[in-house]
Image (cartoon, coloured by chain):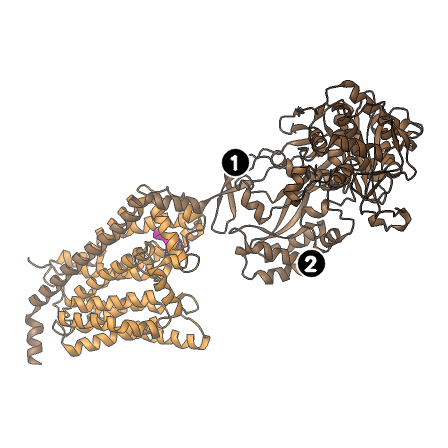
Amino acid sequence: MAFSDPPLLRDAPAHARRMRFFRLRIDWPLLVALLLLAGVGLFVLYSASGQNMAVVQAQGLRILLAFFIMLLLAQIAPYGIQFWSPWLYGLGLLLLLAVLVMGEIGKGAQRWLDLGFVTFQPSEIMKLAVPMMIAWYFAEAPLPPNRKRLSIAGVLLIIPTLLVAKQPDLGTALLIASSGIFVLLLAGLSLRFISIFLFLILACTPIAWNYLLHDYQRQRILTFINPENDPLGAGYHIIQSTIAIGSGGIYGKGWLNGTQSHLDFLPERSTDFIFAVLSEEFGFLGVISLLSLYTFIIARGLIIASQAQHTFGRLLAGSITMTFFVYVFVNIGMVSGILPVVGVPLPLVSYGGTSVVTLLAGFGILMSIHTHRKLMPT
Amino acid sequence: MNHYKHLTLKDHVRETQIFNQRLIVAAVILVILITLLLSRLVYLQIISLSHFSLLSENNRVNILPIPPTRGLIYDHNGILLAQNLPSFTLELVTEHMHDVDETIRQIGGLITLSEEDIKRFNKNRRHKRRFEDIPLRFRLNDEEVARIAVNQYRMPGVNIHAALTRHYPLGALGAHAIGYVGRINVEELRNLDESNYSGTSHIGKIGIERSYEDLLHGRVGMQKVETNAQGKILRVLERTLPVPGKNLYLNLDVKLQAIAEDGFGDHTGALVAIDPRDGAVLALASMPTYDPNLFVNGISTRDYSQLRDSPDRPLFNRALRGQYPPGSTIKPFIGLAGLELHEVNPTEELNCPGWYMLKNDPRRYRDWKKTGHGKTDLTRAIVESCDVYFYNLSLALGIENMHDFLTTFGLGKRTGIDIGGEKAGLLPSSAWKRRAHQLPWFPGETLITGIGQGFMLTTPLQLANISATLSRHGQRRQPHMLYAIEAPDSSRFDVIPTAPVNPPAVASEDNWNTIIQAMKQVVHGIHGTARRISHKLPYTIAGKTGTAQVFGIKQDEEYVEEDVSKKLRDHALFIGFAPVDDPQIAIAVIVENGGSGGATAAPIARKVMDQYLLNAGS
């Protein structure tokens, strides 16, 4: 019932049927834009890391691996992905619980799981598993979802979000939550529910402030409201990054010439704050180019979502694209001082492996959805 | 369930519709949010560019001062009096350490830190600029430097600063003239050119070091450096070299100075020697003296209280600030006034019975010689220092005439020597007494003013100065310490010319000669009060002894030196110049509680004159 779509290409000519096995399923516009973005990222990283070629190489290898995974996923038909969604969600939940238990034993924040040959963050899996799970759940019933289905979807969303928030990793929790919420919204969540939901968020804010947030998180938000309050402590990051961005001007100080970046004034300059390096060295023109690239990728994602032929694919494609936007918006908003500091990387530019893999895996799913469409008469 | 299935199969169109609607709303929100980001970036990068550029530049570029090297001080013959020696100072930048007290404890385990060091450090810490180095220990030796250097990596913010420290190689010799430098205090900081002193820690506190601070200090240099967030200097962008301070050559002759200081033995007192031809101060001694090196990096409380509480008051510059009654040394000048104002005929004789009485005054004004001098003319009155003669003369002159005449020699006013802190002394007049004491002037006060007692006060410098003026028949020069200025970077050597000062009101050459010849007899005559210094004298000296009372003697009581405790004994004075025909040195000596001028003060003057006139160049 879940896979009620008719088999693909049954009526295609024989040569097309043969070709299918040899055809690499790739969405070229997306691939080119992503490659360009990754290239820009490495270029900026070279400067941000203080011209450390080893860092650039390590990141390049990760990106290469991530692109490989993306292309691999693109070859899997959407119904395959749909089939594995609950399993992936279950596995992710187990791993999150494992991390939580290990954290309890180890007494302290625990985000990483060491599998011996590789360490990774199970929360990263959930960034994809949560929208997949909810899209899977919604796809088996007519839309818009009824109240019972909405509540179940809400539970599916809240459990991993809370588990990650407890780690504590507010940035990832935020991304997981939004990826799930996007599925709900796109599935046709009624306006009434949206307003109730918004009201609940507002109502929960004081509770979250008092009980859910850690001191340092509260401090970050207070600092965001007035960074000058604590110019040498928590406000330092924001003050220095706005100085870096602002002093870049229209044309920037030139590649490798950013004084804020290279004289250690800018914190976390190769990870979360790499946007400030780019802004300082390439100026407003660089920023416009980067935003255009992101906008193109997001637009392409939305087009793919709108052209998807099945509920699961369209919900998932929409959610993945919108979540990608959340990355961009939260990161740039935080670095330029209009949002509080939350640990969200600048997608494909920030140094760090796990997020690159998750992001490109998401785009692999997008490609799969787009390239496995049945040719339909318009 | 039926309904359910029906929808699943049929409502793809509606689902797609809802989905696409939602997607459009999402796209619109996305565009709005991206526009928001863009406008923020436009605000930061285009509208506020200049603001942030400035902040970024301020972040990056630090302007650091390069302190100039302080000028050296030499004596007239090029002997070094003040120099700069390299020394190592341990400095802390508290911004770079987590726990300042812990770091100090750590340092205390490596080198010795006194209570004093820590106290001073904490005091300086309170009013410092951000990221400023605060000294903790001065004058580290090589071993201490090595110990700190080895452990430095464990103690961020701990630096060893190699700098030049002022050093006075001759120590206490001439300290009152040369002065010393010390760390700039809060009050000085308020009054000085802050940018020029931005790299300087020391400033002239007293003496030549203070009065020529501007010349000695030089101009600060600057370097623009690029620093990272930790304040570490990465490279120098621009550099303006400092202009070193000027080297100063003084008129002071340290050999003369040494002989003058030695001459006092255990006595306290002062000596000033002036070249009457140009006003050059050849020696300026105030005994006892002190080691100026103690003050350079902050004197310890123990050393300071020792100096301050010493009954001999070594920090007191007697030559400039000691105000003494001139005693009989004023007599030649009173005599000159009498001649000039025609109140006395030099050959006219007067009987001296050993005392003098005013009409309507039962008090007896006694002569130092109880039996009296008998028939006395002006010359004899000066040679034997007859008080009665001068009682008569001063009564004839009156206090106003004496005041006005002595004013033209510069008494009662500062000489204007180029060291600060000089006192003006006191030249009394009836107007002054009315002003200061609200009392009329009494004739008896005129009498004792005529023999340099009573209200009249002079400094040793003033006495030397009026002797110099007298020696060259009224040719008056402002006494000065500085001989020449040398620019170390261009080896320019400028001798400082001296400006003449208004001469005293003496018109007749004969009057000068009469007085000078009488003063020559003081030394060379057989009855002269300073005759004992004429022994084997290859040149001529004109002089006058004096005795200044420290406490008054009651009527019909006799002053017996042995009965009076040393502190209350009379001060011994001597003024003089030599050679008489072409005076090249004029001297004033005061030996506190020294008793008689001829016995204790004059011999010191003779030694200094011998050195200057006989051994010059050796």
Q: Which percent across, then down, holds residue B519?
A: 84, 27
Asked if residue B100 lies left or right of residue A357, the reply is right
The amino acid sitting under disc 1 is Arg
Q: Which quarter of the figure is the N terminus of chain B placed in? A: bottom left
Residue B388 or residue A212, whichever sits in front: B388
Extent of the magenta region:
A265-275
The amino acid sitting under disc 2 is Ser
- How crowded is the residue under tag 2: few (<14 C-alpha within 10 Å), some, or many (20+)? few
The single residue placed furthest to the top in the displayed view is B509
Q: Which percent across, then down, holds residue B394?
A: 77, 32
The chain to which mark 2 is attached is B
- How crowded is the residue under tag 1: few (<14 C-alpha within 10 Å), some, or many (20+)? some
Please give the name of the residue rendered at 28% of the width and 67% of the height, measured from the top-left corner.
A176
Name the residue that disc number 1 marks. Answer: B239
The single residue placed furthest to the bottom in the displayed view is B1
- Chain coloured brown: which letter? B
- Chain coloured orange: which letter? A
Quarter of the rendering containing residue B407: top right
Q: Does the magenta run of residues contain A269?
A: yes
User: Callout 2: helix, strand or loop?
Assistant: loop
Q: Which percent across, then down, holds residue B610?
A: 86, 29
The numbered dot on residue B114 is 2
